[in-house]
Image (spheres, rainbow, N blue to C red):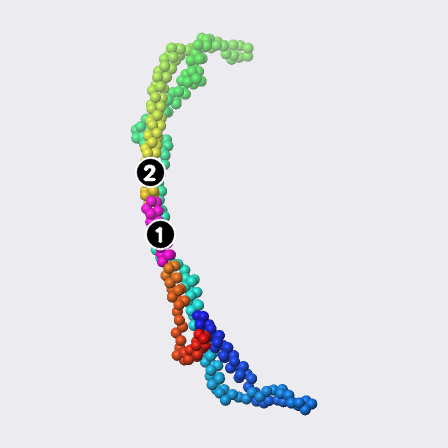
Amino acid sequence: MSQAQSISNMCNQRAQEIANTIGSINNVSKTLTVDKVDYTETEASPMPVNIIELIREKAVLHACQGFLMEALKAKDAMLLRLRMQQFGYDVPQPEHPDLEEPEMLSTADEAWAWSQLSDSEYSEYIEADSMAAHIGQFIHKNGKLDQLRRELPNLSGLEWMTIEDGKKTPVKVTKHHTPKQLLDLHEDLAKLHREFEQRVNYYKAKIKNLVTLENARIHTENKSLTDAYQKEYETRMEQYQKEMNSWRIARSSAISQFEKNRELEINSTAALRINVDPRFQATIDKFLVKSED
């Protein structure tokens, strides 16, 4: 490249000399006499006898210079393309594991537990709950039976009612219950209330047990799903890391090989010599000898 640049400069210098020669050609010379002394105002520069050869030489010099400069630019372009070449790696990067998380079972509630009872069991519960509620309402404090029992001992056999102004009329009070009857009724109903209440409590306890057992089963199932997911995820991640490391090593090796090959191409391209066209060979040989001298 340095030789080509040097020869191009020599071509340019020689072409400039010819251009100066051609530029100085004129048709006349001019002289003037002042105080009997002759002075040359314009020197004669007639057409050189070899003007055609000069023009041809000038054209060849510029053509040779253009040829060399185009060759130099082409070589520079090749080197620039090599230096700007980007590394490309078509081996896809391993994909990160995309494992779908397991769907966890929802915990059970009492509504679920009630739905597990048979129709007969649920009907028995409704009946027992209603019986216990209404019997309790009748016998408990301020219930009707409680009111009757508290009222009965205080009733007298005779009451007075005013029918006319200032005149009282006796009213005979007849008791149709005895304290023992009401007590016996209370005991019978209390016993019945306890029986129904026991069945109600039995079903409520059963519901709580069903919820507890089902949630324990769900917890175990969810834990099993989570453990299996975690194990699978760790296995896939381990495999992914191995594949990723192998991919990085292979890519790094490919980059090194790319850089090595590119450097070899750059050196090879930099060492390329211009393949001279025969029409410019004589001109280049002439200046090449001068360059070597």
Q: Separation of disc 1 and disc 2 at Cα?
A: 33 Å
Find residue 214 and report its image quarter.
top left
Q: Residues within 10 Å of mark 1 (few under 14, many from 20)?
A: few
Query: To which quarter of the image does residue 155 belong?
Result: top left
Give the camera-side residue of 251 and 113.
Answer: 251
Q: Residue furthest bottom?
A: 36
Q: Residue flagged by tag 1: what amino acid is it?
A: Ile
- Disc 1: which residue: 249
- The stretch in magenta equals 237-257
Amino acid carrying mark 2 in the image:
Asp
Q: Which residue is mark 2?
A: 227
Q: Residue at x 35, y 29 (%)?
A: 212
Q: Residue furthest right?
A: 35
Quadrant where the C terminus is found in the figure: bottom left
Classed neighbour count for the residue bearing mark 2: other residues with Cα under 10 Å, few (<14), some (14–19), many (≥20): few
Asked whether the beta carbons under mark 1 and mark 2 sit within 8 Å of each other, the answer is no
The magenta stretch spans residue 251: yes
Main secondary structure found in the magenta portion: helix
Residue 249 visible? The answer is yes
Earlier sequence position, callout 1 versus callout 2: 2
User: Residue 261 or 41: which is nearer the viewer?
Assistant: 41
